[in-house]
Amino acid sequence: MERFSTFSEILSSYLNESQTKDFMRKSEVTFKQASLTGEIPILNPQFLISRRIQIENLLTITEKELPKIKYVDLYLYLSKFSINIGLSNLAEDILSSLIKKIGNKEKLKDYVATAYFHLGEIYFRQGYWKKSEKNISIARKIFNEEKNRWGILRCDNLSGALHGEKGNLTKALNNFIKSKQNINPKKEKYVYSMIESNIGILYQALHKFDESILYLNRALVYYEQIKDQVRISELKYNIANLFYLKKEYTLANSKLDEAIRCAAEAENLSLLSLCFVTKADTLVNLKDLDMANAVIDMAMEISTKINDRLSIAEVYKIKGKIELEICHFDSAENFLLTSFRLNKELENLYNLAETCLSLAKVYEIKHDSKQSNRFKKLAAQYWKSFESVT
């Protein structure tokens, strides 16, 4: 069963203590701490360069040292780690290389399926829905042939998350509940908790907050027991987001700081971007506009670097909201129109509705009643479409 690992955990799993020390000594890259990154070294571009060098070097030195199965296993762990820290291009290269290396070897078909599954994850995070669905479908087909139940469940889980991102919340929820019913909670606690956390996220989107916090806290207890830093940071973010959605902004802001620390420790750049996006919006609601602007600029830097199109669309929306608050109406209009265009491409009904409402407000202030009414009607249409699939 897969565990999402930090780089140090991966090293300790494949090298002994002496080899690990020697590897880190040879792969060490010295860089200056950029002042803007504060205590979050992963935000320093040179940190990612250092990690990339270490990943490439680790694959090189272990190629002849490890048994073939264990080396293939390492490939998959490093691809997943690369996805989390925002090195999606490297992850894609690693996975494509692995698929090519394995070819049609029957005994390694599960590994090929897992590689396609991770490719599906990459495209999911970037908002390329069709490419994501295609790779998930290939992975599921192979897992079915191999009768790999855990692999099938992971594909169903990612498909459910994809439906959720596109606004098909009821379909996603039913997908997760169906998967959960087929799992033994005692024997398959890891995947059971993973699905429970996703159910909690969907209840949150449906504004069923009592049900949401129950599922999220239950999953958090388990992942804290097994010290899965990546899952812990994800759950802490979603708990913070719950308070944001409840408009308890002061508490949400505090919880987001905690999630940011955890995401940084887990070296999860994609989650860190999401934390900054939500924190910036929280700060807008707390009227701390200078800090909101600084935080959203950091989110833009990260999301652009990792090509997280979902977060980029959100960044433009929040930049528009900030400009609206400080009465820079032309800038607000431009940012919001860009967010509107990107969210249309991403088929994100919820964000489209929110962006349209902000645009309607901008045009109302600019005394453009025609455009204001247009975006009010569009917002109503997107809300109706969103509610019809939820």
Image: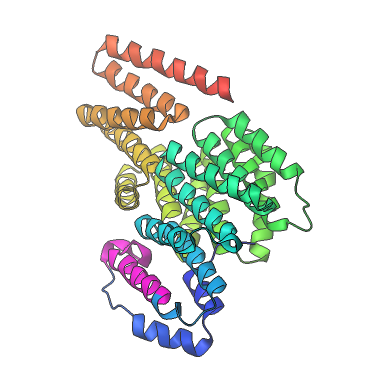
Give how far across and how far down residue 309 sits, in percent: 36, 41
Q: Position of residue 286 (x, y in %)?
A: 41, 40
Can you give x and y, in whole percent of width and height, for residue 51 in the image? 37, 70
Q: Looking at the image, which residue is at 40% across and 33% down?
A: 346
Q: Is residue 333 left or right of residue 56?
A: left
Q: Is residue 234 magenta?
A: no
Is the magenta region chiefly helix, strand or loop? helix
**Quadrant showing the C terminus:** top right
In the image, is residue 14 above or below residue 310? Answer: below
Q: Can you say which quadrant of the picture contains the N terminus?
A: bottom right
Q: Position of residue 87 (x, y in %)?
A: 37, 59
Query: Which residue occupies the foreground of this view, 249 or 54?
Result: 54
Q: Residue at x 38, y 44 (%)?
A: 280
Q: Residue at x 57, y 58 (%)?
A: 109
In the picture provided, is 246 more to the left or to the right than 269? right
User: Does residue 105 sit above or below 325 in this rendering?
Assistant: below
Inspect this view and state whether residue 162 appears.
Answer: yes
In the image, 199 versus 369, the foreground residue is: 199
Q: Which residues are magenta?
A: 34-59
Front position in the image: 70 or 361? 70
| Figure coloring | rainbow
Q: Check residue 52 for magenta coloring.
A: yes
Q: Nearer the viewer, residue 240 or 184?
A: 184
Is 217 positioned to the left or the right of 138 in the image?
right
The residue positioned farthest toward the top in the image shown: 370
Q: Is residue 266 visible?
A: no
